[in-house]
Amino acid sequence: MHAHLGRTGSRRDDLESLAYTLVFLLRGCLPWQGYQVKFGENKGFLVCKKKMATSPESLCCFCPVPFRQFIEYVVNLKFDEEPNYAKCISLFDGIVGPNPDIRPINTDGAQKLIYQVGQKRGRLMMEEDDDEQSKKKIRMGMPASQWISVYNARLPMKQRYHYNVADVRLAQHITIGNEDGLFISSVASCSNLWALIMDAGTGFTSQVYELSKHFLHKEWIMDQWERNFYITSLAGANNGSSLVVMSRGTQYAQQSYKDSFPFKWINKKSKEGFYVTAMATAGSRWAVVMSRNAGFTDQVVELDFLYPSEGIHRRWDNGFRITATAATWDQAAFILSIPRRKPADETQETLRTSAFPNQHVKEKWSKNLYLASICYGRTVS
């Protein structure tokens, strides 16, 4: 699955591929085979989505128990974790049989590994690890609703948030914020209600917004581009409506957007000097905004069906910071970028909560950590 998402492969991915091959050889087919892809759809992404949605129990329902145990073990390995090969081999002892002469394949090399560590020790390790495994979160599971909030270290400044805001109350909150010198820095939607983040550190000189019954009002956006406004944040609701915020005072020189998640388009625009600067979702629909002169030197996309903690931490270690987020009912996307100007404090934190994190925001403020972006969606727990 990591390969489908464009990540560097490791030993865990080889074992995952082996697991699917074994199940295929036993069952004769896999649930993600035979997809009929519509024009413009990414087959690899659809296959990956199906793999993520298929639990080990479902995949191995007609297989002996060790197949399920093997898959549960390998899909929860970390990127650089060394697999316990002795454990993996010993899982199949009971169904392969002890006599190598009657086995349909040659397992002499594998057996030497078992003998090196001792079969008894291998089985003990398997039993101990089973206890550990039961405490682990299996990544294949039911989607869970959550707010995903991102915080950046900043010099002390004024920031304000509003959530569970109905359409008719938006103008009131925004007007009061503007009078206090605050501009919208991030917007999100949950259950067709809106969340607003407004602060004094945006650098914007003026701002306009539109609440539309349609997901992205193209004519209005193009009119604002003519007036030198650029999209700085946007959000979509489950009912298909959208809130688009456009600002002056940005460093952007040109802008473009798509109302889908188009990998090929992102790659093409990246070669032209564009970077993703905003994202939104409405139900299962995506909106991706790319801007020229965005102030980044490099950028990557982490798109997954669960929170990609491992990938985010690895990117943080390499100087990337989360610059845009969005989520649907079963996917989460994070845009991570390297700023052209290195920030004075590179501290960045993320938080996942079932309710809007109003108490957590106040705690972060006391540490000079301010909300940079927020989104609501459902990802596999």
Image (spheres, rainbow, N blue to C red):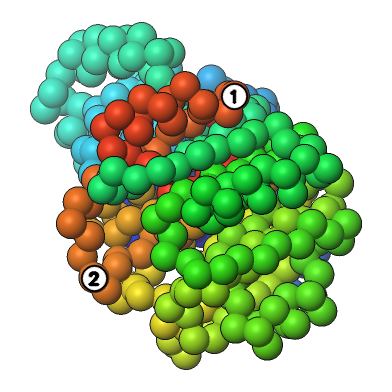
Please report the residue visible at 40 percent of the width from the left and 20 percent of the height from the top.
136
Mark yes or no: residue 169 visible. Answer: yes
Which residue is disc 1 drawn over?
355
* Quadrant housing residue 261: bottom right
Q: Nearer the viewer, residue 275 or 381?
A: 275
Please report the residue visible at 30 percent of the width from the left and 76 percent of the height from the top.
297
User: Residue 73's x, y, as percent?
Assistant: 40, 29
Can you tell which mark lies on residue 171? none
Q: Nearer the viewer, residue 138 or 335?
A: 335
Mark yes or no: residue 380 visible. Answer: no
- Name the element at disc 1: loop
Q: How packed is label 1: few (under 14 Cα within 10 Å), some, or many (20 or more)?
A: few
Which residue is disc 2 drawn over?
341
Tell me the kind of residue under disc 1: Ala
How many angstroms separate mark 2 from mark 1 (CA)?
34 Å
User: Residue 220's x, y, as percent?
Assistant: 79, 75
Please report the residue visible at 20 percent of the width from the left and 27 percent of the height from the top.
114
User: Residue 156's x, y, as percent?
Assistant: 29, 43
Please report the residue visible at 50 percent of the width from the left and 54 percent of the height from the top.
181
Above or below for 74 versus 219: above
Q: Nearer the viewer, residue 222 or 20?
A: 222
* Quadrant housing residue 273: bottom left
User: Residue 214's x, y, as percent?
Assistant: 86, 61
Quadrant the C terminus occupies: top right
**Looking at the image, which residue sits at the far front?**
179
